[in-house]
Image (cartoon, coloured by chain):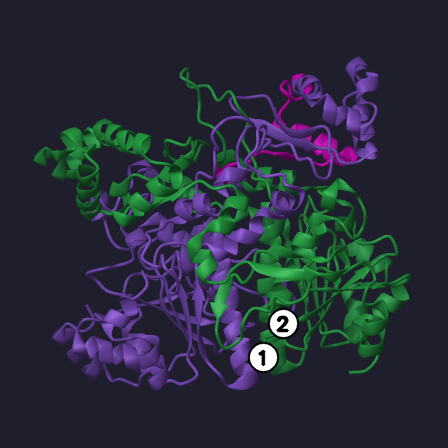
Amino acid sequence: MALEGLRILDFTRLGFGAQATLICGCLGAEVIRVESTRFPDAIRVMPPFVPEPGERGEAFGAATLANATGAPSPNRGGIFYKYNTGGKKSITVDARHPKGLAVLKDLVAHSDVVTESFAAGTLDRWGLSYEVMRQIRPDIIYVSMCGFGHEGPDTNHVTMGPTAQALTGLTFMVGLPDRPPAGWSFSYLDHVGGYLGAIAVLAGAIHRGRTGEGQHIDVSQLEPATALSGALLLDAVLNNRPSRRPGFPTGNRREHPPAGPSGAYRALGDDKWVVVSCRTQDQWEALVEAMGRPRWAADPRFATVAGRVQHADNLDAHLQAWTSERDRYDVMDMLQRAGVPAGAVQDAADRLERDPQLAARGHYTMLGNTEVEPLPLEGVPFRMSATPPHTGGVLHRGPPCLGEDNEAVLGEVLGMSADDIAALDADGALS
Amino acid sequence: MTAPLDSVRVLELTDESADYCGRLLAGLGADVVKVEPPDGAPSRHIGPFLDDEPGPDRSLCFWADNVGKRSMVVHDDAEVVALCGAADLLVHTLRPAQAEARGLGFAALHELAPSLVVCAVTPFGSDGPWADYLADDLVLMALGGSMAACGYGPGADGVYDTPPLASHGDQAWRTASTYAAIAVLGALAWRSQSGAGQLIDVSAHECSASMTEWHLMTYLCSGGVHRRGPHPTLTASDGRQVAALNPDFLGPHVFAGMLEMLEREGVAGPLSDPAFADPVHRAANYREVWRALKRLAEKHDGETLYELGQGAGLPWGVIRSPEEVLEDRHLRARDHFVELEHPELGRSVVYSGAPFLAHASPWVMDRRPPLLGEHTAEVRAQWSQR
């Protein structure tokens, strides 16, 4: 695997940081997650919980850290399973225990990369600042991931994905004209920040391979987002066309390149939708043909893309009258076979149960652990011919139970005997 | 100081779906050469255009994702193949049959240049029942699951009367481009040990399908699916919206800081009742919490409200348009935005810059997007030798 031999000492929590190290794990890195029994990763103990076989769990709606005390175990938190594939290992070490800190320092000495996603300054308070780590291991690659990063006036700001999305323009870009933005209902930037965190690890490793030099790479959740608005920023600055203007954002319609019809249309069923998007004249003509050449489609106002854009409301009403009598997948398949870009609006259940492409591509990998039955989990969504990634990492294993690798890691990496480990545990250093 | 990909040669044969991959690689210091037909790469013909005048060197769509690259006009595929022999990496957006037809199939390239890494970014990947289906970003946002979870909530009657929505900014393509860059870095890291190239097959659909947080897990755990609806927002005195997430989400200690701020602002009202210190009582009477926050919002503009909330330890963020982000003091202090000279226009243009701060290997951001064919002769001369 591509990153085999790279060892990452991983202090990440929640989504943003853990997304980065799951990618590294899927590429073959050895990821050693460090938690403590008193402060496990919050997503281990937040609903939804992976149910016992034959049971049905609680939905996410009621989740708060405050009500997480009723968690059945630190190993059934469903969100944990999204972000901790990649064959990550789990150890529990109390960084506030002197012997625990000593163990962590030994692990730094034996690691290539240290990753974390705490608030800025947390590792410093433990006595594990970058300065300390580089004295232990001069070429250590330290990748910190937190909302505002470790430098700048607002490093103490509290962020979650939706906060960063609001601040960077992403929330603004989702909405219908002349209404408040709808935004994203999930933390898209936990993913994007994590992707850039993975790029930071990879770039740091390549740089060290070339120069022998380690470094601290400071990843925030804001900066990876600013390029995501594409040309909107340039259009505002250069053409004096701010995005904050009447009529913008434009829902699902895009001015560039001009397309018509283009949007989400109702399909048969309760709140079912299908996207149809014609950019070219050929695609439009194929759509007309596929619909059986309805009379409305011959309206000269719809003859050119400019006309279809200008009369989009009228066009959309006609098209939706056609789609709304049909199943969304039938529309998609019929139009795709005719050469028209189209796609069902799918939710997570559809992706798992109905999407033949994801199934055929092996998008899901069945992985469990000693406490949880195998589940269809996700890793990295690409293939590599010579170094195939695996959702279960090098060892093809599922997300780890809390502390399940204490003996293995301390024994194999640090060369400790079973007695040493038992003594540390008895001292409370491994809690 | 050198950049991580300093002197790594990247040949790029992409349309607008994967231009962003090369931009990331250029930021890491790679020499990214965009191979273009005589009339320019597809993204040069997508607006908006500078001063709304179309032209291959005026597309802002092109500028946004091609900063840091060089451009070479190539008339025939034989030259592209020859250039592959001098490159470390080829990134393209050709489907397998298209690549074969142009002499750019992986088997042939691998024989020509065994250490060449080839990365193909396509809508659905190289195989599977949908491999030949067509997609733009909107189609991929629908199939991937983002749209189903984005948009306005149902009306009072429980009926969703507006459609699922996709973000502007081509987020499915961007996610695919970013994953392509990750895979490329993995392949280059491995090549530095093994000397061998390989083929990377990126399905934009799979990328888009894996970016909806824990939605899959919710379904697996409970059988439920996430429906669409905005996060809670406050409307400030200037009409700006501020994302104001339920502060209890972070734990009960957050309420104390919020209450102190609300009392200082004179809008706490019933929240000063000690009963509200109990999270259960608070949850049952959340309407009172929200009313107090609305009273606060009426007093302040959006940016001030954001600072007040953050000062009290609340994960609030004012909803900004992309151009409003330019004024963020934190990003300015981190020198995030970069002005690049466009000498042919006699002006500079501001671009979003480094996605992270890497002090030993800083992000490279010193070359404006290339004019069409600007570096044809230069690259031909340089790449003819290794």
Q: Which residues are drawn in magenta?
A: A321-350
The image shows residue B260 at horizontal and vertical percentages of 17, 43
Indicate the secondary structure of the residue bearing disc 2: loop
Asked if residue A187 lies left or right of residue A428, the reply is right
Query: From this viewpoint, is residue A154 visible?
Result: yes
- Identify the residue at image location x=38%, y=44%: B317
Which mark, by number, is residue B375?
Answer: none
Picture quarter with the C terminus of chain B: bottom right
Q: Is residue A90 magenta?
A: no
- Contact (Cβ within 8 Å) of mark 1 with mark 2: yes
In the picture of the structure, the residue carrying the numbered disc 1 is B2
Residue ID for mark 2: B29
Q: Residue B269: name its quadrant.
A: top left
Which residue type carries mark 1?
A: Thr
Q: Earlier in the sequence, mark 1 or mark 2?
A: 1
Residue found 57% across the figure and 83% down from its top: A210
The chain that hosts pointer 2 is B
Tag 2: residue type? Gly
State the CA–CA distance, disc 1 to disc 2: 8 Å
Please tell me the colour of chain B: green
Q: Residues within 10 Å of mark 1 (few under 14, many from 20)?
A: some
Residue B298 in the image: x percent, y percent? 32, 30
Drawn colour of chain A? Answer: purple
Q: Are marks 1 and 2 on the same chain?
A: yes
Where's the N terminus of chain B, which quadrant?
bottom right
Question: Which one is nearer the viewer's eye here, A409 or A310?
Answer: A310
- Residue A359 visible, this orientation: no
Which quadrant would residue B198 be assigned to in this image? bottom right
Residue A310 appears left or right of B261: right
